[in-house]
Each structure stands twice: as C-alpha cells, then as structure tokens.
Amino acid sequence: MRLISINTSRPTQVEYQGKIISTGIFKKPVRGKVYVAKENLQGDQQADLKKHGGEHKAVYAFSFDHYEYWAKVLRRTELSKGIFGENLTISGLEEANLHIGDQLTIGECVLEITQPRVPCHKLGIAVSNKDMPRLFIEHFATGIYMRVIKEGFIESGNPVVVTKQTPSKVSINSLFRASFDKNYQESKSVITKALLIPELSLEWRQKISSSF
C-alpha cells in the first residue's frame, strides 16, 4: 500500500434542503509533510464533533483503487483526491484484508483501525448525488477510521505498512456487511467476534450490540 494523497479542510457552510449547514467534508490535497496528532491532522477540522472526529475517528482513509468504480457510477471523467471526505487516499487499501485492531505505519505515524465508515448525507453533498450514501453502503467498501497510536509526520508517497495484525481477524468489510447486509450469513459470528475486540470503537460496539 502507498499513500497517494493527504487531504484536509476547515469547516465551510453550504446550503442543504433550504438550510445552511457546516461541514468539513470538502477535503483538498496538501503538499509536503503533514503532522498527525492524536485527534486530527494538521490543517484539518471537523464541523460536527458528535458524529465526526475524536479519538476513534481521528483519521479516515479511503482506497484509491475504488476511484475508477465511482467515476463510472457518478459518470465523471475524473475525481479529485479527497472527494469522499478522506484524510488519506491510499492505493492497495482493501477493506476485506484489513481488520479491527490492525496497526498501519505511515512515515513517523502509527495508526490503529477502529471501525468502518457509515456515510451520511454530507457525502451526497460532496459528490452532488443525493443517493450516494445509499450507493456507498450497498458497495460495502466505505474505507476505514483509525486512532493515532504514535503521532508524527507523514507525506504523500510514503509506504503504508501493516506492522501489527490482530488475531481476531474481523475485517472491515465483514463487520460492515454484518451490520448492513441482511443476506450476509456470517453476521452473527462476525458480530460476536467483533464485540470481543478491545480496539473496536465505542460507537460501533454500541451499534452492533443492538443486533442481538
């Protein structure tokens, strides 16, 4: 895996359904080294701290490999890096091969996977398609949220290396499907395993606990 782009933004106000809302989803690529702190990247800020950011969602990564698929779905010739609201655009990132509790080393930084992403209406605003949250969920490849284990500088082009694998092997893809795919036969097994993983975020622990 390799870090293709680092993307940040400050909150901006936009009109949505006749109301003015604040959002930090409009991420733009930045050049040079960027410092990753415990709850944020340098130059980045979330608007709604109840739903975004915090320890367990300090950094959001999305796969560059998914861009071609979404360009076809959205009928775009090109999609700018960060358009999905991700801080890190990473090539080779595959949700089926990354697990809750795995740790990734990028530059000086060590990040730990805590949960999948659940898209909200702001993703639809970012790509100018109100159906995007639903389409995103149905594709089962929504990227990963991570906590910061070790702060430090990262830079586009850095290798992204899995330096610790959790023995539980509950992948981001399987956990997301267990929560959203009614036809997924492994749901109960996956959720049972996930609830035993200490690195799982509190948000998702509460979310999947209600499945029983």
Image (cartoon, rainbow, N blue to C red):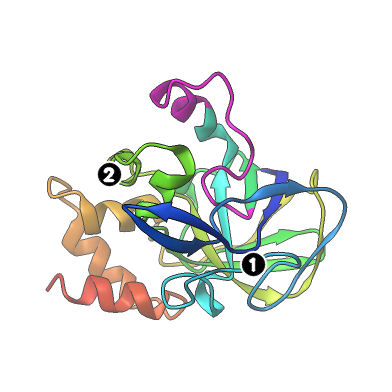
Residue at 71% x, 61% y: name it: 105
Residue at 54% x, 51% y: name it: 85
Front-most of residues 19 and 73? 19
Q: Position of residue 100 (x, y in %)?
A: 45, 65
The residue furthest right is 32
Residue 136's place in the image compared with 175, above or below, is above
N-terminal label among 1 and 2: 1
Span shown in magenta = 68-87
Asked whether, in this view, residue 200 is left or right of residue 24, the answer is left
Q: Where is mark 1, residue-wise?
A: 111
Q: Position of residue 160 (x, y in %)?
A: 70, 51
Under mark 1, the amino acid is Leu
Using the numbered discs, state the Cα–Cα distance from disc 1 to disc 2 in whole angstroms: 28 Å
Front-most of residues 165 and 90? 90
- CA neighbours of label 2 inside 10 A, class few (<14), some (14 to 19), many (20+): some
Q: In this rendering, does residue 96 appear at all? A: no
Q: Where is mark 2, residue-wise?
A: 134
Front-most of residues 92 and 193? 92
Under mark 2, the amino acid is Arg
Residue at 24% x, 71% y: name it: 208
The residue furthest front is 18
For mark 2, give the secondary structure.
helix
Q: What secondary structure predominates along the stretch shown in magenta? A: loop
Asked whether, in this view, residue 83 is left or right of residue 187, the answer is right
For mark 1, give the secondary structure.
strand
Q: Position of residue 148 (x, y in %)?
A: 64, 73
Are the residues flagged by discs 1 and 2 in contact, CB closer than 8 Å? no
- CA neighbours of label 1 inside 10 A, class few (<14), some (14 to 19), many (20+): many
Q: In this rendering, does residue 76 appear at all? A: yes
Front-most of residues 100 and 204? 204
Q: Quadrant of residue 8?
A: bottom right
